[in-house]
Image: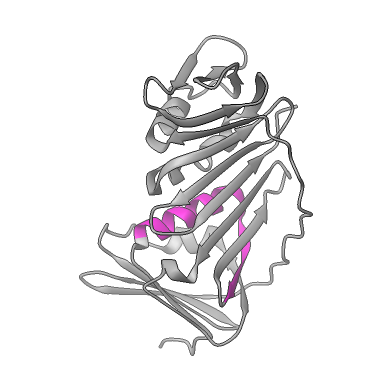
Amino acid sequence: MSIEPIVKLEHPSAKAFLIVLEVLGNIVDEALFTFTDEGLLVRALDPAKVALIDISIPSSAFLEYSISRNLGVGVNLTFTLKTLPTPKKTDKLVLLANDEFYELIIEGTGIKRYKYRSIEVSATEIPEIQLDFKVRALIVSHAFRTAIKDLKGVGSIAFVTEDSDNLYLKAAEGGVQVRLSKVGGSIIDMEVQEPSKCVYDEDYIVKVLDLAGVTESIELKFGNDLPLNLYFTLVDGGSVKYLLAPKA
């Protein structure tokens, strides 16, 4: 029996929506989903306080988005993702939510319904930090994903650039090196205010790598001793911002 919803939304791609949920589940076990007239917002800080993820999907990205009032829904990601099936490419996703429950409905050749109780989750209060990034690059998504996969197992990845044409991803301890470049077509645009190098934890980059499958390009920002800022503009609408602290 379906719940009486305060929020009802329908997303054109269950597969793409669940990829975003899975990436979020790589960062935190539970999160607060905030539904407003403008759309869906999720902000979460990983337990080690190394990575911050911001998800924003506007109401316009949905086939249907109806809401009678603002609503916060506490989602147990670990349990929810464990129970959901892998959707087909053509499946749609319907989400219903009220103060007590949320329901996910996957619609394809058949209809599969999954109902969960909303849990108590505190809002993640993080003050806005103004960062003066010295490097900004717009990178083809699949090229970035391939580069990170080529560095699999190195543990720490150094992001290095000296000019506006090339970005090097290197094993911090030496060895493997991958070059992304404008000439090679992997960099769409790049601005470098000063030569920069910073090292980040490979595992934390891999946690969000699947987002490269639902976006065409990634905006990447960093600088000397600054966090890595990855900004994914989702193909179906919406965005994910990921901020990763430098490795000590």
Horizontally, residue 35 falls left or right of residue 120, namely left
Q: Which residue appears at 50% of the width and 66% of the height? A: 58
- Looking at this rendering, what residue extends furthest in the top direction? 175
Is residue 22 one of those drawn in magenta? yes
- Vertical arrangement, residue 40 with respect to residue 81, above or below: below
- Looking at this rendering, what residue extends furthest in the right direction? 127
**Which corner quadrant holds the N terminus?**
bottom left
Horizontally, residue 16 falls left or right of residue 168, namely left
Horizontally, residue 184 falls left or right of residue 244, namely left
- Vertical arrangement, residue 198 with respect to residue 245, above or below: above
Which of these two is toward me, 235 or 12?
Answer: 235
Looking at the picture, how far across and down is residue 238, in whole percent?
48, 58
- Looking at this rendering, what residue extends furthest in the left direction? 109
Q: Which residue appears at 51% of the width and 54% of the height? A: 239
**Which corner quadrant holds the C terminus?**
top right
> What residue range appears in magenta?
15-36
- Vertical arrangement, residue 149 with respect to residue 83, above or below: above
Q: Which residue appears at 66% of the width and 24% of the height? A: 199
Q: Which residue appears at 49% of the width and 20% of the height? A: 165
Looking at the picture, how far across and down is residue 237, in whole percent?
43, 59
